[in-house]
């Protein structure tokens, strides 16, 4: 059985594209959830990036950000040492299962983008035999299907709340509540929830462990005639009896048919009417991406409406009808693909070209690095000679990695850059962080506005006010630094130091 590595990140903003990790913790356990190893890493702020004041308040990361003597690059290097130690990559036949709380929505893409910006193997935690899992949706499903397995608070709308700072005190009152929203505490709570689910909702926990592997998940979806899965939308988890229907033509993920819908009515529609029906709410076809999906026994759905009334025999007959009518599946598949293409065209038409061309936003659109570039990046990390690192960065063929490589040198050993190159990057950083436009990353003006908004909150506590004042002082110092950079750039241009 594979070991399980629980991981949690705290960042200085909420955007996975432009956020930087300020602390990251991990706990390695065996398949019986017994402790094997753990780590906690935190670092200083990355030059050229402005922390989000609200994020710093939530994760209480300011002290670590200001006092740490570890650079962000050193943090990422240490992180990869633990990843390779826990799951030897890429030569381990088993790897490990990386577990998280909302990791698919935040931690995993954040780590991948941080790897990208650090010239490190981008997909190291979900390749080479390792897999991603996320226990937030598992907990939601377990609470829905086996209500007594977890204690929860409830929202104003009566829905269970699954924030760790709610679940932790409710289920494990012995924990120090002041430590919630720290990476180490969130890892510890995630482990405790996993242990409780394994004890109180073992069939769901076991099924979740089966589908951490994309290959296993795909095989189960393709080879299970009908099954229960759980979708979460509008703040609520909902059970569905489904069967595999087709594979998405563009995204290549499984699409399932929701069996509460009688397919005979849909089969009678012409193609245009079918496509229009598929655009409306209450979809009868839903995506089940291979990102730790849940494939559960059909018995769970049969305990709930409308499936309790519909009955198993009818559900099975509908699944047979779909299997025996491939033309209907093809029509639905084509309609789904066309709808996706139309949404992409509409989305692209409204995109800011400057945002699209920003290397921060090109990890997925730019594709994988070439093999020669991967070898250069390995050499970059195998030497401590910054002059050599500069030469290696210049030899990269992909401009994305060249961009971030030069900035790694700027952030860690600026003297290794030629004066002209240093000034170019420093001024670019200053222009980015001092921008008065509404950017998709935190700027100094945005941070200052947010600080003022927080300080103006009604009944703000003295603790929060003092904290915001401290954040404000840090932002003011950053403003002085970057405004000076712009002034100095004008002087340098006059002297001919900047091209």
Image: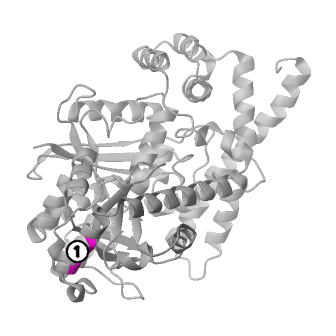
Q: Is residue 43 visible?
A: no
Q: Is residue 342 visible?
A: yes
The answer to whether residue 115 is left or right of residue 189 is right
Residue at 40% x, 30% y is 121
Task: Indicate the secondary structure of the residue bearing disc 1.
Answer: helix
Which residue bears the numbered disc 1? 317
Q: Which residues are magenta?
A: 314-319
The answer to whether residue 427 is left or right of residue 334 is right
Residue at 23% x, 76% y is 315
Q: Nearer the viewer, residue 375 or 32?
A: 375
Q: Where residue 417 sits in the image (x, y, percent)?
A: 64, 17
* Image quadrant where residue 304 sits: bottom left
Q: Nearer the viewer, residue 279 or 346?
A: 279
The answer to whether residue 441 is left or right of residue 290 is right
Q: Nearer the viewer, residue 269 or 449?
A: 269
Residue at 54% x, 27% y is 412
Q: Where residue 153 sits in the image (x, y, percent)?
A: 31, 82
């Amino acid at each position: 059985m594979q070991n399980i590595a629980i991981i949690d990140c705290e960042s200085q903003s909420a955007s996975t594209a432009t956020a930087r990790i300020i602390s990251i913790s991990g706990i390695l356990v065996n398949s019986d959830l017994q402790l094997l190893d753990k780590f906690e890493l935190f670092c200083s702020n990355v030059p050229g990036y402005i922390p989000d004041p609200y994020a710093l308040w939530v994760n209480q990361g300011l002290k670590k950000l200001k006092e740490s003597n570890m650079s962000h690059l050193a943090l990422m290097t240490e992180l990869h040492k633990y990843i390779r130690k826990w799951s030897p990559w890429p030569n381990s036949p088993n790897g490990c299962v990386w577990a998280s709380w909302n990791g698919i929505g935040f931690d995993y893409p954040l780590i991948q983008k941080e790897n990208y910006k650090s010239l490190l193997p981008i997909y190291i935690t979900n390749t080479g035999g390792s897999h991603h899992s996320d226990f937030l949706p598992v907990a939601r499903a377990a609470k829905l299907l086996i209500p007594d397995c977890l204690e929860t608070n409830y929202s104003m709308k009566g829905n269970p709340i699954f924030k760790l700072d709610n679940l932790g005190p409710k289920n494990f009152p012995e924990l120090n509540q002041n430590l919630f929203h720290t990476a180490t505490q969130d890892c510890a709570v995630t482990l405790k929830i996993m242990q409780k689910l394994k004890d109180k909702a073992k069939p769901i926990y076991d099924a979740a462990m089966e589908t951490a592997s994309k290959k296993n998940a795909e095989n189960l979806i393709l080879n299970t005639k009908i099954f229960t899965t759980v979708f979460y939308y509008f703040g609520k988890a909902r059970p569905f009896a489904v069967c595999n229907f087709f594979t998405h033509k563009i995204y290549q993920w499984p699409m399932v048919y929701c069996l509460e819908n009688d397919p005979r009515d849909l089969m009678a529609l012409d193609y245009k009417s079918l496509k229009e029906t598929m655009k409306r709410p209450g979809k009868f076809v839903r995506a089940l991406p291979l990102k730790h999906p849940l494939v559960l026994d059909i018995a769970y759905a049969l305990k709930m409406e409308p499936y309790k009334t519909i009955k198993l025999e009818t559900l099975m007959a509908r699944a047979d009808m779909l299997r025996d009518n491939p033309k209907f599946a093809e029509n639905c598949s084509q309609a789904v693909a066309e709808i996706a293409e139309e949404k992409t065209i509409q989305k692209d038409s409204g995109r800011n070209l400057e945002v699209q061309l920003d290397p921060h936003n090109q990890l997925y659109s730019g594709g994988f690095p070439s093999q020669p570039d991967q070898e250069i990046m390995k050499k970059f990390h195998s030497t401590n000679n910054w002059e050599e690192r500069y030469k290696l960065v210049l030899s990269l063929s992909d401009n994305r990695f060249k961009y971030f490589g030069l900035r790694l040198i700027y952030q860690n050993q600026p003297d290794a850059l030629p004066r002209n190159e240093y000034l170019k990057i420093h001024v670019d950083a200053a222009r980015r962080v001092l921008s008065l436009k509404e950017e998709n990353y935190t700027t100094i003006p945005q941070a200052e506005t947010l600080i003022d908004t927080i300080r103006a909150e009604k009944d703000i506590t003295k603790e929060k006010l003092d904290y915001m004042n401290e954040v404000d002082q840090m932002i003011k110092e950053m403003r002085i630094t970057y405004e000076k950079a712009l002034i100095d750039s004008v002087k340098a241009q006059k002297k001919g130091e900047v091209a």
